[in-house]
Amino acid sequence: MSQDPYSVLGVPRDASADQIKSAYRKLARQYHPDVNPNSPEAEEKFKEVSVAYSVLSDPDKRARFDQFGVTDDAGGGVNPGDFFGGAGGFSDIFGMMEEMFTGRSRGNQRAGRDGEDHRSEVRISLNEVLSGAERTVTYKRMAKCANCEGSGAAPGTSPETCRTCSGSGQVTRVQQTFIGSIRTSTQCPTCQGTGQTIPTPCSVCKGKGLEVVTEKLSITIPPGVEEGTAMRVTGKGSDGTGLGRPGDLYVVIDVQEDSRFERHGRELATSYNITFSQAAIGDTVEVEGLTGSLTVVVEPGTQPGALTRIRGEGLPNVRGSNRGDLIVQFNVVVPRKISERDAELLREFAEGRGEPVPKGVESSGFLGGLFGKKKK
């Protein structure tokens, strides 16, 4: 090693193992690449600190360095392979780092397996979006076996504590690395994380502790839900095994299309046909709303495609705010057939306003075929 490990860690030559470890942890936190992203200097310093600790944390290497100034008999540097004790690699080191920095272990501390989530769909009408709705959802899930009460063992027998993991559901191994001993935990291969073995399995669930059941659940759908909204019902999915948590049920809302309206969030849009006379003179009409007829004023001179807004006749949102608006679009409908008298009045109207007086046509166009052949 080219540098003095004691100087790198900033400890005296008679430093205890605890002093060395404490100094290393402090410097490792300071120069760790996660704390100093895109800093080559910090990365290099972190490597120096790690190499120094790998020497001073190993009694044999420390003794060789104290006596010869090197850590191997050939006088060379530290072998990078020594950092990992021949096994484990970076994943175990980063696992240890996570414990060092956060205080959390990467292993799963609960013996068992969580239950699966489930998905179901319900359909509601647009009117039910306004008022809310009640639905009963029927679905299949895995529930604790009634025959063995979820133990997985035949009635009259009991599960046994797993001998491999002693009931923890995990197996632990210890590795020697350049930063000391690291414990890693994985799911027990014998009991699959349950912490128990079943000498005499239940005849119904075959030792799984779970069976398929049909569940019925009443749910309340609040007003204002959107199409595709997923309502989460906690704990109503499949049961877990051992100490595993139950899954959740997600109920997806399908809002049935309503030919009367288009929905845009809280707002509704509809169209209403009016005549040329109504558009020109003005009128009062009855437009269909969600809960009944609504009186709407057609202003004089209303143009084709004109919009009018009716406040508070749309939909609420799920946060319970006031209802949105209903937007009405007026379509001015032109009659496809008119009488000779109607045509005469329209010409008089156009002439009186100083507009071009329409002559009409014989076989195609606006008045095509309305009056038959011209008399000679």
Image: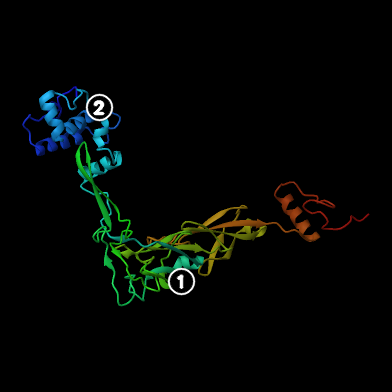
Q: Residue 328: horizontal and vertical position, in percent?
A: 55, 58
The numbered dot on residue 302 is none
Q: Is residue 128 left or right of residue 300?
A: left
Q: Residue 296: horizontal and vertical position, in percent?
A: 54, 63
Precedes in sequence: disc 2 or disc 1: 2
Answer with the quarter of the image where residue 119 lies: bottom left
Answer with the quarter of the image where residue 65 lies: top left
Q: Amino acid at mark 2?
A: Glu
Q: Nearer the viewer, residue 9 or 259?
A: 9
Quarter holding the N terminus? top left
Q: Which residue is mark 1?
A: 138
In the rendered image, the residue lying farthest to the left is 14
Q: Residue at x 21, y 28 (%)?
A: 48
Q: Residue 335: horizontal and vertical position, in percent?
A: 72, 59
Answer with the quarter of the image where residue 78 lies: top left
Q: Can you say whether 125 is above or below 96 in the image? A: below
Q: Amino acid at mark 1?
A: Thr
Circle 1: element type: strand
Q: Nearer the viewer, residue 8 or 341?
A: 8
In the rendered image, the residue lying farthest to the right is 376
Q: Residue 82: horizontal and vertical position, in percent?
A: 24, 33
Q: Residues within 10 Å of mark 2 (few under 14, many from 20)?
A: some
Q: Which residue is mark 2?
A: 44
Q: Residue at x 63, y 60 (%)?
A: 273
Quarter holding the C terminus? bottom right
Q: Residue at x 26, y 37 (%)?
A: 84
Confirm whether residue 299 shows in the render. no
Front position among marks 2 and 1: 2
Colouring style: rainbow
Alpha carbons under labels 2 and 1: distance apart:
61 Å
Q: Residue at x 58, y 65 (%)?
A: 285
Circle 2: element type: helix
